[in-house]
């Protein structure tokens, strides 16, 4: 089988699986693709709830006041299986969030990427589980 | 494929994929089973299907066009698919544009679609033999045109028909159910199931959206046809080591590929090895499909825990979708007011 045929096969499979297939709800209806947003703040609490987790973030504004934001994340069941727990994101942790603003204009966004201040990225899945290095994963040693 | 080649093919693929696939292929690909598998029994003597299982797989639902006429993938194709799935799993998706970024909901860390085929089949649809869902009847196509007039959207996927009301969103977004057989079919995550048994009953707990099917195997009949339920009414019986479940009495409030209250399912669930169950479902609705059709989905033992779902508790998504639409309307009205006449 040539490279070209693989391409066709994989294309067909991607179509068959459908990139957005199976999410609990429509993200396109909830968040605005025209409003990418970057937020830096400290975690105030994590709602470890189905169908999706929500991370509450205190974001410091230029005038010194803080603003509370809510960031929508993945289903807790999947995150747990990937080795990420509620304890992985303790209160007070500073994170950087790349995401998209909610269409309803409130301080809500989806969590595209979450980056810790030391540069480690969460939820990228680029290698291993993507979960924080907490010593529990044998590959960290 | 000739028998000799087939044996070689299965042997090659088994090396590539490990033992669970070998088990999956016993009897179905024509390879001689090493040893006939004996289904364990419960203490009260019924076949024991109990355990926690996942049905996640990258096997296509319908057979892709470029493998038409073939029931099984080659080892090379499987290796390419699994490699692509594994790299997709780490895909940051930076090159899809912002719209694609939002529509796919997250980067791939959040998903749990799996990176393996759990069967060499080229499709979950095994009948008709072309691996495709049979065409809809004329009647079903006419019904589709009238869907918009119904009081509530009957779709069960991650979408809706509009944003005027929660009733315009799917039964999935409304935290009701994905319906049957969708709730028994793999999706993007939470593809986990727990089967437990007691004398005369089999219970299947479904992780996605929660809920447990309690299936009696004590010989009782279906409830009156006037009683209609989201998940229908299921009765079970044992045929040898296979649990056969017939489900009727579906409601007209949810669709499965165009089928609703006339849907009838026959599921055949059996162990094919210590770590794998074969789930087979035949879907019949003469008012919707031009012929009955059958899906086969492997359920692989995970030994993992199940987690509760409590969907309504955190369903901010529904509020976000509806209030987002109101905000967009308000902005549009404002822009109209502000623009010169």
Image: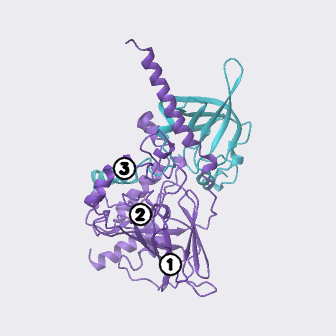
Q: Chain of mark 3?
A: B
Which residue shows up at 35% across the image and 75% down it?
Answer: B8
In the image, which lettered chain appears cyan? Answer: A
- Residue nearest the viewer, comparing B273 with A50: A50
Q: How many angstroms separate mark 2 from mark 3 (CA)?
A: 15 Å
Please tell me whether residue B201 is drawn above or below residue B144 in the rendered image.
below
Q: Which mark is residue B261?
A: 2
Residue at the extreme front: B226
Which residue shows up at 45% across the image and 41% down it?
Answer: B103
Residues marked 1 and 3, same chain: yes
Label 1 secondary element: strand
Which residue shows up at 56% across the image and 40% down it?
Answer: B319
* Residue B278 percent location from the top left of the image: 46, 73
* Residue B64 percent location from the top left of the image: 31, 58
Q: Which mark is residue B147?
A: 3
Let me know if residue B272 appears in the view. Answer: no
Q: Which residue is mark 1?
A: B236
Dividing the image into 4 quarters, which one contains the N terminus of chain B? Answer: bottom left
Dividing the image into 4 quarters, which one contains the C terminus of chain B? Answer: top left
Of mark 1 and mark 2, the one earlier in the sequence is 1
- Residue nearest the viewer, comparing A141 with B81: B81
- Residue nearest the viewer, comparing B180 with A64: B180
The image quadrant that residue B275 belongs to is: bottom right
Q: Chain of mark 1?
A: B
């Amino acid at each position: 089988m040539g490279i070209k045929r693989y391409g066709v096969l994989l294309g067909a499979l991607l179509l068959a699986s459908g990139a957005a297939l199976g999410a609990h709800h429509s993200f396109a209806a909830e968040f605005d693709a025209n409003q990418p947003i970057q937020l830096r703040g400290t975690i105030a609490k994590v709602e470890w709830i189905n169908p999706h987790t929500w991370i509450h973030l205190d974001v410091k504004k230029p005038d010194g006041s803080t603003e509370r934001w809510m960031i929508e994340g993945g289903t807790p069941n999947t995150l747990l299986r990937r080795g990420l727990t509620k304890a992985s994101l303790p209160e007070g942790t500073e994170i950087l969030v790349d995401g998209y603003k909610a269409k309803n204009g409130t301080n809500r966004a989806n969590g595209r990427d979450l980056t810790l201040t030391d540069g480690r990225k969460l939820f990228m899945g680029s290698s291993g589980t993507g979960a924080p290095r907490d010593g529990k994963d044998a590959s960290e040693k | 494929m000739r028998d000799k080649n087939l044996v070689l093919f299965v042997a090659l693929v088994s090396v590539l994929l490990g033992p669970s696939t070998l088990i999956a292929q016993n009897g179905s690909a024509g390879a001689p089973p090493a040893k006939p598998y004996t289904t364990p029994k419960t203490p009260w003597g019924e076949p024991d299907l109990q355990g926690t299982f996942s049905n996640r797989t990258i096997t296509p639902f319908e057979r892709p066009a470029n493998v038409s006429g073939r029931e099984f993938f080659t080892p090379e194709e499987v290796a390419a698919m699994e490699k692509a799935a594994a790299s997709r799993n780490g895909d940051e998706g930076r090159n899809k544009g912002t719209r694609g970024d939002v529509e796919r909901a997250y980067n791939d860390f959040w998903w749990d679609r799996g990176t393996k085929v759990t069967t060499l089949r080229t499709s979950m649809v095994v009948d008709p033999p072309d691996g495709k869902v049979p065409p809809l009847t004329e009647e079903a196509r006419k019904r589709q045109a009238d869907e918009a007039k119904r009081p509530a959207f009957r779709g069960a996927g991650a979408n809706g028909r509009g944003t005027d009301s929660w009733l315009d969103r799917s039964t999935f977004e409304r935290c009701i159910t994905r319906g049957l057989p969708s709730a028994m079919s793999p999706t993007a995550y939470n593809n986990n199931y727990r089967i437990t048994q007691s004398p005369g009953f089999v219970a299947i707990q479904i992780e996605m959206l929660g809920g447990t099917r309690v299936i009696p195997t004590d010989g009782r009949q279906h409830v009156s046809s006037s009683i209609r339920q989201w998940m229908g009414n299921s009765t079970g019986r044992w045929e040898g080591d296979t649990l056969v479940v017939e489900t009727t009495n579906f409601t007209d409030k949810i669709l499965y590929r165009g089928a609703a209250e006339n849907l009838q399912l026959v599921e055949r669930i059996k162990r094919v090895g210590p770590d794998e169950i074969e789930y087979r479902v035949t879907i019949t609705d003469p008012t919707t499909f031009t012929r009955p059709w059958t899906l086969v989905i492997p359920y692989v033992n995970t030994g993992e825990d199940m987690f509760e779902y409590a969907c309504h508790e955190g369903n901010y998504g529904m509020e976000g979708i509806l209030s987002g639409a109101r905000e967009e309307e308000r902005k549009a009205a404002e822009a109209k007011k502000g623009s010169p006449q």
